[in-house]
Image (spheres, rainbow, N blue to C red):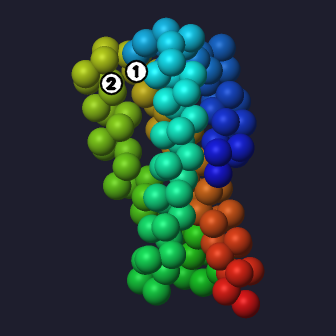
Amino acid sequence: MLVFSIIIHMIIFGRHWDAISFMRPFETWQVTFGMPISIIVFGILISWGFFKLYAGIPGAGIRKGLNYGLIIFLIFMPFVEFWNYFQLKIPFILTLAGILHYLLSFMVGGIVIAAIYGENKK
C-alpha cells in the first residue's frame, strides 16, 4: 500500500509532491522519521481493520477490497484533507489533489489487501 501510495502521490501532486512542507520543513526529524513510521502503522491498522471487518464488507474477492478501500476513504477523508485545508490554509488545489490521492491509494490498497488476505485464507 505504501509503494502504490507514494507513486500515486508523486503522479498527482507533480511539482507539489512535497506538500507536507506546508506544515513543516521536509528535513525535520518529524517528517524524515515520523512520516514513514506513521505510514507503516497506518497501513498495519488498515490491514487489521480489513481482517476484523471481513465478514461485513460487501462483495467478494477483489471487489471486497475495493469496497473496503472506498469505505475507509469515506470515513478518513473529512477528517484529514478538509481539516488540513481549514486549519493549515493550504491551497485548495492541493486539497483536491489529496482527495484524489487518498481515493486511489485506498482503492488500490484495499484491492492489494484483499488479494493477499484471500490467498492466505486458502
Q: Considering the image in quadrants, where does the C terminus appear?
A: bottom right
Residue found 46% across the figure and 22% down from its top: 30
Q: Quadrant of residue 72?
A: bottom left
Question: Which residue position holds label 1?
Answer: 92
The image's mark for residue 85 is 2
What percent of the width, then of the height, locates residue 113? 63, 66
What percent of the width, then of the height, locates residue 4? 70, 45
The kind of residue on which mark 1 rests is Phe
The image's mark for residue 72 is none
Check the image and name the residue furthest to the left.
87
**Which mark's residue is nearer the viewer, 2 or 1?**
2
Task: Report how far apart the C-alphas of labels 2 and 1 lie in the structure.
Answer: 7 Å
Q: Residues within 10 Å of mark 2 (few under 14, many from 20)?
A: some
Q: Is residue 43 left or right of residue 116?
A: left
Instruction: Please report contact status of discs 2 and 1: CB closer than 8 Å, yes or no.
Output: yes
Nearest the viewer among 9 and 116 is: 116
Q: Secondary structure at mark 2?
A: helix
Q: Is residue 103 above or below residue 84?
A: below
Q: Is residue 112 above or below residue 115?
A: above
What percent of the width, then of the height, locates residue 111? 65, 65
Q: Is residue 41 left or right of residue 87?
A: right
